[in-house]
Image (cartoon, rainbow, N blue to C red):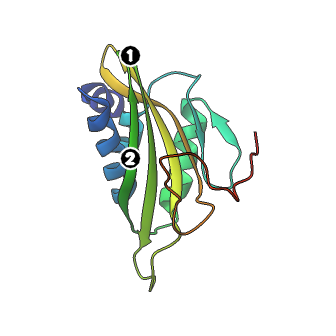
Amino acid sequence: METLQLKKALFPTPQDAETAFYEAFTKSDLDGMMAVWADDDEIFCIHPHGARISGVEQIRESWREIFAGGQTLSFHLREQQFLNGMMLSVHSVYEQITVSGEARPRNPMVATNIYLRTERGWRMVAHHASPCPSATPARTETGPRSDAKTLH
């Protein structure tokens, strides 16, 4: 039954897949989360402060563990940037996460979400989230901040 349900999900645009990703995250919906991901062992995910995990089974298990924590999260995405092609779409976003029961919002995460057009619509192939280096991300039109360090 689960496999049949996952096969029915169709995301006509990368934005539809991204919306479904964050809805599943907010609802702690493992089936909804995995419906967004491609069925490919080359997919990968890097959770904040975590190692890279690859493949459908490892990614499913990581989300199962996160959702088992019982936290209710809400997301506000800001400063979204998109690089769209015919077959691939790369999204860079700042995730402002609020945890139910906490007095104040957490520092934002910066995330990169990559979507691939498949025969069943757009599917996530990579998610990488990291803590934002400061509570207020720097935005400049001329380049990086003067105090920024190049890591790679």
Q: Position of residue 21 (x, y in %)?
A: 37, 44
Q: Position of residue 23 (x, y in %)?
A: 31, 51
Mark number displayed over residue 80:
2
Circle 2: element type = strand
Q: Quadrant of residue 5?
A: top left
Would you say residue 28 is visible in this rendering? no
Q: Residue furthest front?
A: 142
Left/right of residue 103 with respect to residue 65 in the rendered view: left
At a point 41% along the width and 71% down the height, the residue shown is 98
Left/right of residue 36 with respect to residue 49 in the rendered view: left
The reply to whether the C-beta atoms of the residues labelled 2 and 1 are less than 8 Å apart is: no
Name which residue type carries label 2. Gln
At a point 58% along the width and 47% down the height, the residue shown is 62
Left/right of residue 53 with respect to residue 67 in the rendered view: right
Q: Residue furthest bottom?
A: 103
Q: Quadrant of residue 43?
A: top right
Crowding near the residue tagged with mark 2, few <14, some 14–19, many ≥20 C-alpha atoms within 10 Å: few
Task: Specify the quadrant that holds the C terminus.
Answer: top right
The residue indicated by pointer 1 is: 87
Q: Position of residue 70 (x, y in %)?
A: 46, 68
Residue in front for this viewpoint, 151 or 45? 151
Residue in front for this viewpoint, 74 or 29? 74
Circle 1: element type = loop
Residue in front for this viewpoint, 150 or 80? 150
Separation (CA) of disc 2 from disc 1: 19 Å
At a point 33% along the width and 58% down the height, the residue shown is 27
